Structures are given as C-alpha cells and as structure tokens.
Amino acid sequence: MTDATLPLIDLPHLYSGKVRDIYDAGDDRLLMVTSDRMSAFDVVLSEPITNKGRVLTAMSAFWFDHFAGVVGSHLIATDLDALPEPAQVPELAGRSMLCKRAEMLPIECIVRGYITGSAWKEYRTEGTMHGAALPAGLLEASPLPEPVFTPSTKAEDGEHDLNISFEQAVDLIGAELAERARSVSLELYRQGAEWATQRGIIIADTKFELGLVDGELIVCDEVLTPDSSRFWPADQWTPGTNPPSFDKQPVRDYLDGLDWDKSPPPPPLPAEVVKATSDRYVEGYERITGRSFAAWPGVA
C-alpha cells in the first residue's frame, strides 16, 4: 500500500499500513513515514487528506517531548537533515520520524475516560465494559468514575482487534510487564487529558503502542493524535449525545449519507469534505499544542 504523492525511498521497505510506511534505517533504527492516506470503515479512500501526515507527526513529536518525564519514546529525530540520506527529500519533511527499533507489545494499550464507541455498545446491552460492571444510569459520552485501562489484541490484516481483560493481558505478556503497561498508559492519559481540558478539548479515549528497547518500556508509533484518540470540543460535549470530534468526522458523516456498502472500492470524496477534514486535524493540533501548524516543516 503506497501513496502516489510520496516518493519511493531507497531503503529496505518493511511495512505499509493504512497510514504509515516503515523502512529499515540501519543500526536498529526505523524510518516511519506518515502519509496523508485516510481510511474509513476499514477501507482506504482514494483521496489523501492534505497535511494529515504532518499533523500526526507534529502532534506525536509534541507529546513525546511533553511526556519525557513519564516514559521514554522511540523518537530519535524529525528533522529532515537527521534522516538517512535517501530520505532527505522535501516531500518527506515534517512527516517522517527516525526511531529506535522496539520489540512491540502484542496488545493495544487503550485507556477510556468516557464511555463511547464499542464500550458504550457493550454497556448499553450488558451494563459492563470489557466484562467489568459499571454503575447504572450512565449516558453515552458520560465520564467514567475514573480512567480505565482496557487492552485489546492486535489483529492481523483484515481482522479486528478483540477486547480482552487485564488478566488475559497478563497471560500474553506477564504480570510485571502488564502492570507497568497499565500504569504508564493511565498516567499518560491522565496528564494528556488534563492538558487538553485546559485548552477546551476532552480526550474521551486513546490507544497507546508500547514496546521494549534494551528491556526498557517506551511509548512508540503515535501519541494522543486525532487518529489514535477521540478529541471532543468541550463546549459541544453533552452526556447522552455523540459529540463531534477533531478527526475524520466530516468523512464519516459524508460516507454515512451515501448508499455505500462500506466495502471497496470507496466512493470519491468531494474537495470540500477533504478540506473540512484537513482543517479539523490542523485545528486540533493548534489547540492542543498552542503552536502554529504553518511553522511545522514541510507545510506550504
């Protein structure tokens, strides 16, 4: 899966996902390139979302630095001149991360602060979340009594992640590592949510990718971005509703209004939907970080 808007890189190609391409940068390092590809309903759309990859990279870099006192990260550099020479091309500016190669945990480290998405569906029918009982009377988008670590499996291509209990996570990675992953994930969420709340954004839930480098647990991939988290504008949040979010909401809303069976090939996106989605990502970055996105490398 490649992005026609990005150049081919003369490095060993390891993996292409829905959004990211990963290359071997040598010396136990990886080059992670974040494209502007957009997926919806597990289908990659034909139209890229302008600057989406740069927003995700910029926001992750901000959070990696912000959380340095909590846990280390895989990030080595984002500057173009610090990348391997074959990757020092203008098109990759601002969307590339040189990273340490980590041994990734085989679980998704999800933290939920509000009940929404699949957790809301389970609660509505069973009164539970990941099998654990919750207080009666919660509404959709209600805050949970406290943030909860709700891990899942990492699905193979074409499959879906499966929610698992903490005990099942222990079976997969061991008690000590599972406790550490839970503790780190909850602390990252708490600090990130507090920061965002002060800037008018609720982080309803998020997913962390954790790994090991020389036995040390670190955070990898992306952190508290619109792709890995649900960001709600605080002034539009009301329990009992599904608040709008700083992500691909315009894309989902548009596609939901079509007679499309959610299988390939996807319908084309109008230019105004692409622009609205791009604007949504940029606004989320600027509100969270307090920085101008125009100052990020590669932004025209």
Image: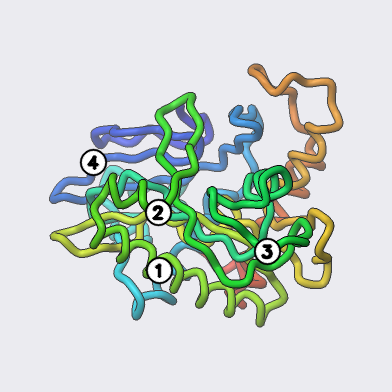
User: Residue 141 versus residue 230: which sits nearer the camera?
Assistant: 141
What residue would you read off at disc 3? 135
Q: Secondary structure at mark 3?
A: loop
| Amino acid carrying mark 3 in the image | Pro
Where's the C terminus, which quadrant? bottom right
Q: Secondary structure at mark 1?
A: helix
Decide if residue 152 is in sight here: yes
Q: Are marks 2 and 1 in contact (CB under 8 Å)?
A: no
**Where is residue 179, by image quadrant?**
bottom left
Q: Secondary structure at mark 4?
A: strand
Q: In the figure, is residue 224 to the left or right of 215?
A: right
Q: In the figure, is residue 146 to the left or right of 287?
A: left
| Amino acid carrying mark 1 in the image | Phe
Decide if residue 55 is in sight here: no
Of callouts 2 and 1, the N-terminal one: 1
User: Residue 186 versus residue 33: which sits nearer the camera?
Assistant: 186
| Amino acid carrying mark 4 in the image | Asp
Q: Residue at x 41, y 45 (%)?
A: 33
User: Residue 43 versus residue 171: which sits nearer the camera?
Assistant: 171
How far is the residue under mark 2 from the one under mark 4? 33 Å
How far is the residue under mark 2 from the one under mark 1? 26 Å
Mark number for residue 24? 4
